[in-house]
Amino acid sequence: MPSTTHVKELKQEIHTDFKHLFRPLQQIAKWTGLHSVQIEKESRFYTVKRVLHWIKLLIVYFLIVSAPFKFLYVLLYNDSGNDGWIIPILAVFVFFVASTYVTVVSYFSVSKYFSSFCESLNEHQRLYGNIQINLFMKICCKWANWIVVFVAVIPSTLYGFISFHFQDDLIDFFRPLSFNGVLNTVLTLSYASSNSFFLIAHQVTLNMFFILTFTLFLMQFSQLNERLETSLAKNLSPSHQEKTIETIRQEYSSLLACFEISNSIIRHYLFALYAMCIPIVCFLLYGWLRGKLTRGESLALTALAMFVISFVLLHTIIGAIFSIMAHSPLNVLMKVDIQSITDKAVHSVSLFVSRLNGPTIGYHVYNLFTLDTNTALGLTGTLLTYGIVMLQFSESGSSGINACNNNTST
């Protein structure tokens, strides 16, 4: 039989290179301006490459950053005379402000932490053995470029089609641009489609990273929990048992360190997603209940609200599942009979339990809140509360209008 040292060396030889695994996702982030590009000074045409790279970044970020200012211009200088025009404009303004914030801030976090995250996983493998990668992760990482482009092109094209088809209803959305003439129409649709493509591409890239890392850590925590249960269930020698518990605790801490780096990459997107959810939903409900939206505005706002709500629900569910799995070793450790284990094992168990009972483990948003089961309940309650308030406000407003009409007629 091969020795333990030989098995460990074999595991290190066949371990997954996470820099190579996540390279397609890193490449699409660089192509779309979400990740900085390192150009070697020794490469040919270094100056030309650097200038072209900065020109590309300027174009991408002009398209992205200009959108909130365009809608701010509409809010300040609109003279359409329609008292309901501000509702859809505010909803879209909130979306583009949040999306611009995600792109600009995530550019720095992705550039700073992405390579460190891959290196931390490689170091974890060096210390504790190979990390198993399932088929889903392999396929998503391999085809990340095409997945991001495909998913970004479809909504961008749909957005351009809706804008063109309902151009009379959505004219306020595109000021100071317009659809007067072929040239203006092409420029307006090109700007709108390009802006939405880069925004969606960045968010899809971050979402893929979020889902892939969630899958990775979920598998690892599940395996650690199974190993912990197995080691405590077996009649191991005291020395072997204390060594196993301490090794699992250290491996758990190492995984948490890797997870915190991944959270540093995704936290800006999570903050913006939850921050824009309630305003967009409230503006949509108000416009619906008050009858202030045109058909084109209703379609555009409904699509936007469904997009935001679906992603909020997805991330909330994923966050709750992850938090439950990350805390699952606590249920096993609480069943340990400390009188039957050594003092060193008791010390390891105490440290393990203290960490699990400490700050909530999960995707946290600027230390404001953590995505867990409480977040799911709180978000549902908040949306229902605002929905009921909007409904009551609409009914009271309608009653007041009807009363005024009756008084006028009499």
Image: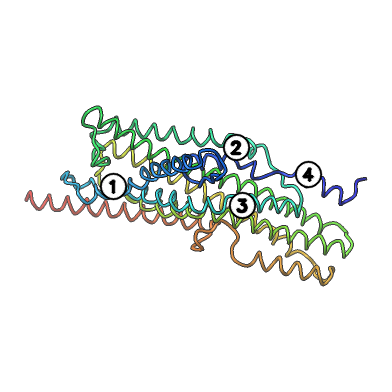
The answer to the question of whether label 3 and label 2 lie on touching residues, with beta carbons closer than 8 A, is: no
CA gap between label 1 and label 2 equals 36 Å
| Front: mark 4 or 2 | 4
Front label number (3 vs 2)? 3
Residue type at mark 1: give it: Phe
Residue at image position (65%, 51%) is 119
Which circle marks residue 13 in the picture?
A: 4
Secondary structure type for disc 1: helix
Name, please, the residue furthest toward the top.
182
Along the viewing direction, whichever of 290 and 4 lies nearer the viewer: 4
* Amino acid type, mark 2: Cys
* Residue underneath mark 3: 117
Of callouts 3 and 2, the N-terminal one: 3
Q: Secondary structure at mark 4?
A: helix
Q: How many residues crowd mark 3 within 10 Å: few (<14), some (14–19), many (20+)?
A: many
Residue picked out by circle 2: 140
The answer to whether 49 is drawn above or below residue 4 in the figure is above
Q: Amino acid at mark 3?
A: Phe
Residue furthest to the left in view is 410
Mark 4 near mark 2, Cβ–Cβ under 8 Å?
no
Q: Position of residue 113 (x, y in %)?
A: 56, 53
Mark 1 sits on what residue?
A: 71
